[in-house]
């Protein structure tokens, strides 16, 4: 099969397509012929040997444990494709089903490949009207947003929620989901992204350059979902209701930052997405009924993975960077 196989993590890697063996599947897994992949900031950071630990520490030289010493390495977690084989214990899917999901995160998803072995619990049926490209996008980023709004915090109708980077991978799903759940959504963004934030459903648009957090009328927020990571927790403090959470998504919080936030009475925490069958099934339902749609920033061929990484690394993409896989039989 075609795959992008790395002997080691190296940001200078050309990410060239080569040949690899089709993976075997376990009893609880299915084999998926991939039609599309999605790229995330964590893909780029992992290639740079950079991870965030579960306690929020930012670390370099530590990605090897994520892969349990596996070498060579196949990166990636987000897939959409068609089931070509099912394990003996699998009842959720059958051969020929179109599926999508986030595979083994955190861990070794091995998604940059023509075939991926995935636990059935990590996947959901792709809605028929949703393209493989759009489904691949609605995986790690969409689950991150959904878990933030339904697990780490439970959105209630009328909640006032501020979302930063509201047109990025996580943010554009978060805006739509928060509106679906009945929240009043305030988007903090740049002028170039203001129109899209409104199109996604934001009730109010604030711009980074003109919003003065220190002097503006308090926003009385029930939640800040910080998908951008520009500002320290103290920047949001006067706009949060007492005890209201601030959820950081793009990077961890050092122990010093955690201690400083606690001393200031701020309920700020870094949250990492994890595989959860209920979450990916919920995403499938949201896609099916049109409550969320995937904004695609660009589609690249599998052989153009390096260019896709460059597009992701710029940090200005509106929505998701998608990889289209070869369509050979």
Image (tube, grey):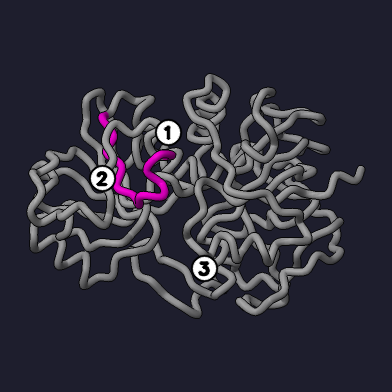
Whether residue 158 can be seen here: yes
Residue density around tag 2, few if under 14, some if 14–19, many if 20 or more, within 10 Å: some
Which badge, 1 or 2, comes first in the chain's sequence? 1
Label 1 SS: helix
Residue 264, quarter of picture: bottom left
Residue 81 image label: none
Question: Which residue is labeled 1 in the image?
Answer: 200
Q: Does residue 262 show up magenta in the picture?
A: no
Residue density around tag 3, few if under 14, some if 14–19, many if 20 or more, within 10 Å: some
Which badge, 1 or 3, comes first in the chain's sequence? 3
Question: Which residue is labeled 3 in the image?
Answer: 45
Name the mark nearer the viewer: 3 or 2: 2
Label 2 SS: strand
Task: Indicate the quadrant containing the C terminus: top left, top right, bottom left or bottom right.
Answer: top right
Real-space CA distance between mark 1 and mark 2, rounded to the nearest whole angstrom: 15 Å
Whether residue 28 can be seen here: no
Task: Indicate the quadrant containing the N terminus: top left, top right, bottom left or bottom right.
Answer: bottom right
Residue beneath the point at 36% across and 56% down = 228
Which badge, 3 or 2, comes first in the chain's sequence? 3
Image coords of residue 41 (percent x, y): 51, 60
Image coords of residue 237 (percent x, y): 12, 53
Name the mark nearer the viewer: 1 or 3: 1
Q: Is residue 316 above or below residue 10?
A: above
Image coords of residue 63 (percent x, y): 53, 72
| Range drawn in magenta | 184-196
Question: Which residue is labeled 2 in the image?
Answer: 206
Q: Does residue 188 show up magenta in the picture?
A: yes
Real-space CA distance between mark 3 and mark 2, rounded to the nearest whole angstrom: 29 Å
Image coords of residue 317 (percent x, y): 51, 53
């Amino acid at each position: 099969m075609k795959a992008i196989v790395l002997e080691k993590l190296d940001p200078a890697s050309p990410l060239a397509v080569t040949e690899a063996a089709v993976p075997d599947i376990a009893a609880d897994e299915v084999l998926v012929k991939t039609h599309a992949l999605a790229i995330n900031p964590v893909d780029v950071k992992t290639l740079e040997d950079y991870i965030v630990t579960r306690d929020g520490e930012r670390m370099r030289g530590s990605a090897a444990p994520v892969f349990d010493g596996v070498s060579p390495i196949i990166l990636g977690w987000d897939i959409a494709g068609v089931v070509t084989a099912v394990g003996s214990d699998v009842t959720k899917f059958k051969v020929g089903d179109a599926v999508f999901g986030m595979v083994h995160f955190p861990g070794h998803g091995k998604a940059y490949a023509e075939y991926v072995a995935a636990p059935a619990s990590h996947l959901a049926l792709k809605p028929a009207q949703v393209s493989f490209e759009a489904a691949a996008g609605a995986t790690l980023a969409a689950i991150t947003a959904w878990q933030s709004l339904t697990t780490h915090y439970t959105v209630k109708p009328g909640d006032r929620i501020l979302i930063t980077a509201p047109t990025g991978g996580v943010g554009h799903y978060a805006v739509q989901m928060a509106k679906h759940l009945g929240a009043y959504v305030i988007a903090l963004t740049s002028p170039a992204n203001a129109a899209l934030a409104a199109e996604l459903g934001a009730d109010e648009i604030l711009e980074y350059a003109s919003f003065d957090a220190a002097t503006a009328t308090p926003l009385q927020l029930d939640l800040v979902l910080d998908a951008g990571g520009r500002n320290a927790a103290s920047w949001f403090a006067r706009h949060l209701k007492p005890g209201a959470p601030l959820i950081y998504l793009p990077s961890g919080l050092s122990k010093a930052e955690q201690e400083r936030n606690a001393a200031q009475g701020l309920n700020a925490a870094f949250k990492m997405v994890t595989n959860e069958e209920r979450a990916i099934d919920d995403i499938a339902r949201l896609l099916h009924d049109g409550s969320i749609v995937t904004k695609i920033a660009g589609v690249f061929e599998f052989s153009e993975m390096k260019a896709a990484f460059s597009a992701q690394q710029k940090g200005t993409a509106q929505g998701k960077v998608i990889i289209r896989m070869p369509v050979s039989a």
